[in-house]
Image: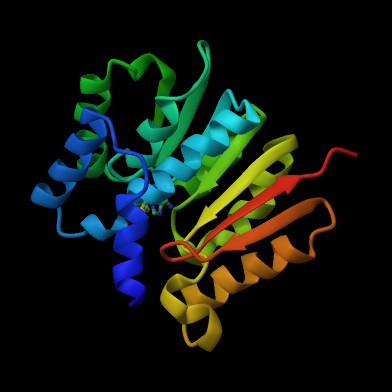
Amino acid sequence: MKEELQEYAKQHTSRESEALQFITKATAEELQYDDMLSGRQIGTMLRLLVQTSNASNILEVGMFTGYATLSMAEVLPEGGKITALEMNTLYMSIAERGFDMSGLKRRINVIHGNARKTCRELTDEYDLIFLDADKQNYPQYYADLKPKLKPGGLFVVDNVFWYGGVIELNDRKSRAVHELNEMLVNDPDMETVMLDIRDGLTISRKRIR
Ligand SMILES: C[S@@+](CC[C@H](N)C(=O)[O-])C[C@H]1O[C@@H](n2cnc3c(N)ncnc32)[C@H](O)[C@@H]1O
C-alpha cells in the first residue's frame, strides 16, 4: 500500500520540464546509482520553497547530476543564482548537458571539489541551503553552514531517515544523520519540521531575532 501511495503522490505532483526529464533519463541510462537523484517530489518541494520564500541566493551541497539544482534554478527570480558543490566529474558532465538544454546556465555556478573544503571557502550568505552530500559529515556541514544562512533562511536536508538507519543507529552514516536531526530540533535558532517524504526531508528555518 505504501508503495502504491508513493506512486500516487508522484503522479499528483507537477510535471517536469524537458531538461529535467533529460537529466532523469541520462542518469538512469549512464549511471549505476540513479537512485541518488532527488526526483520529482523533492525537486518540486524545493521549487515551492524557493518561490514562497523569495529565495534568490541558493547553495546546494551534493549536486549529483543536477536534478535539484535545475529544479530550483528554473524558478529563481531574474538575477538569482544557485551555487552547487560536487566532486564527481562524471556526474557533473550529465548536469552540464541538462543545464545547456535548459538555457539557464547563467544562474548556476558549479564548484568542483571536496565540499568539506569548498563549503568553508564560500563567502556569501544564502537564502536557502540544500544539504544532500556525504551523510557521515552532515553534522560538520551544519556547523560550517549555519553561519552562512541568512536570518529567515531555509536549511533543507535530504535523506534524514537514512533508509531507517536513524532508528537502529548501527553504522556511522546513520549515527551522523541522527546527530544532525538532533542538532536541528534542539537548536533554539531554528524552527524545524521533518517530513515523511521519500527517505525523509527536513525543512528548518533560521529565526529572525
Ligand atoms: C544523493 S547525491 C545528490 C543528489 C542531488 N542533490 C539531486 O538532487 O539529484 C549526493 C552527491 O554528493 C556528492 N558528494 C558526496 N560527498 C561529497 C563531497 N565531500 N564533496 C562534494 N560532493 C560530494 C556525490 O558525488 C553525489 O553526487
Residue located farthest toward the left when viewing the structure as drawn: 29
Along the line of sight, which residue is nearer the eye, 198 or 63?
A: 198
Q: To which quarter of the image does residue 70 belong?
A: top left
Residue at 27 percent of width and 42 percent of height: 65
**How many labels, in total?**
0
The residue under the point 48% across, 88% down is 170
- Left or right of 124 in this view: 10: left
**Residue at the image point whose x is 20% and y is 42% from the top:** 90
Image: 141 above or below 127: below
The residue most toward the right is 209
Query: Where does the image place residue 114, in percent across and percent down from the top left?
Result: 43, 46
Q: Colour scheme used in the picture?
A: rainbow
Against 208, is 173 above or below? below
Pinpoint residue 19: horizontal percent, then vertical percent.
Answer: 23, 29
The image quadrant where one finds the C terminus is top right
The quarter of the displayed image where residue 73 is located:
top left
For the question of whether residue 62 can be seen, the reply is no
- Could you say which quadrant of the image residue 138 lies in? bottom right
Q: Position of residue 17 (x, y in %)?
A: 27, 30
Residue at coordinates 42% horizontally, 18% vertically from top-left? 107
Left or right: where 54 falls relative to 21:
right
